């Protein structure tokens, strides 16, 4: 059994090698090779992690359209059924749903004229992160946004920023002190949205998967 310390050392060496390859342009040579390797043998991704301290000064975000939210985990089934109806199942793993229900996560939706136009999944305690295919246990004072989505026709109207900010205010009142989320480094619109919601970039975490094993350069629970 490989220890967590050994995995950390291996992951850190992989991260250093990746940084060197980017600086020296070696990745241009290796990229075509890696693209031909089946994902079950080797898979790599990286995400920018963000945080916001919930006890910091609150901000107000006014969306450009009237929105309603019911901040309750009783919304879970309604949100889940809407995700299925819209076929937004790209990142929905059965284990994700199972752990979310067991841990009491909030899958909150936002509505315009009585119809759902977006959702946000808020986790705490144990969370299954589909991009890592791994369950992470966060400290009890932390909430983690592990997915959000707004219908394309309602983007650029501050819907996501409003939804996220209202969730921050709600969970701060419930005693949580910090929020975390992660975004693909190429997803500029989402990075801009989270930044406008008061979140600050803290670290890039690289994930390597090989033969069913996952190696992370940092443990998200320690960020």
Image (spheres, rainbow, N blue to C red):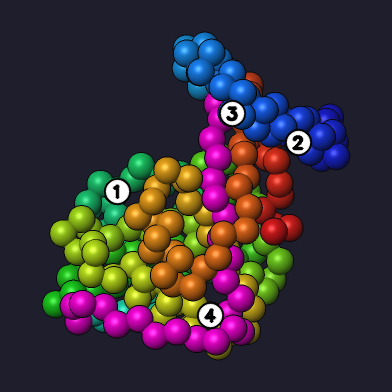
The 10 Å Cα crowd at callout 1, few under 14, some 14 to 19, many 20 or more, is: few
Q: Determine the residue positioned at 35% across, 55% down.
A: 189
Q: Say which residue label 2 marks.
A: 12
The 10 Å Cα crowd at callout 2, few under 14, some 14 to 19, many 20 or more, is: some
Cα separation between marks 3 and 4? 39 Å
Q: Determine the residue positioned at 19% across, 64% down.
A: 154
Tag 4 and tag 2, C-beta contact below 8 Å: no
Cα separation between marks 2 and 1? 34 Å
Mark positioned earlier in the residue sequence (4 or 2): 2
Mark positioned earlier in the residue sequence (1 or 4): 1
Cα separation between marks 1 and 4? 26 Å
Mark positioned earlier in the residue sequence (1 or 3): 3
Residue 99: in sight, yes or no?
Answer: no
SS under mark 4: helix
Q: Position of residue 124 (x, y in %)?
A: 59, 66
61 lies left or right of 82: right
The quarter holding residue 61 reads bottom left
Q: Say which residue label 3 marks.
A: 22
Which region of the structure is painted magenta? Answer: 43-66
Q: Is residue 60 magenta?
A: yes
């Amino acid at each position: 059994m490989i220890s967590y310390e050994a995995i950390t050392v291996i992951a850190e060496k992989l991260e250093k090698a990746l940084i060197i390859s980017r600086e020296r342009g070696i990745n241009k040579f290796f990229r075509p090779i890696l693209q031909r390797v089946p994902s079950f043998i080797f898979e790599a991704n990286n995400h920018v992690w963000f945080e916001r301290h919930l006890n910091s000064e609150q901000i107000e975000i006014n969306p450009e359209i009237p929105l309603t939210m019911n901040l309750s985990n009783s919304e879970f089934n309604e949100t889940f059924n809407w995700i299925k109806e819209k076929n937004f199942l790209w990142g929905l793993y059965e284990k994700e749903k199972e752990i979310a229900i067991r841990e009491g996560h909030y899958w909150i939706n936002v509505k315009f004229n009585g119809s759902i136009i977006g959702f946000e999944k808020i986790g705490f305690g144990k969370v299954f992160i589909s991009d890592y295919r791994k369950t992470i246990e966060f400290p009890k004072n932390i909430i983690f946004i592990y997915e959000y989505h707004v219908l394309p026709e309602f983007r650029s109207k501050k819907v996501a920023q409003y939804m996220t900010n209202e969730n921050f205010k709600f969970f701060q009142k419930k005693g949580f002190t910090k929020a975390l989320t992660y975004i693909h480094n190429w997803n500029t619109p989402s990075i801009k949205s989270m930044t406008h919601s008061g979140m600050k970039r803290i670290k890039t975490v690289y994930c390597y998967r090989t033969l069913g094993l996952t190696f992370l350069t940092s443990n998200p629970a320690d960020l």
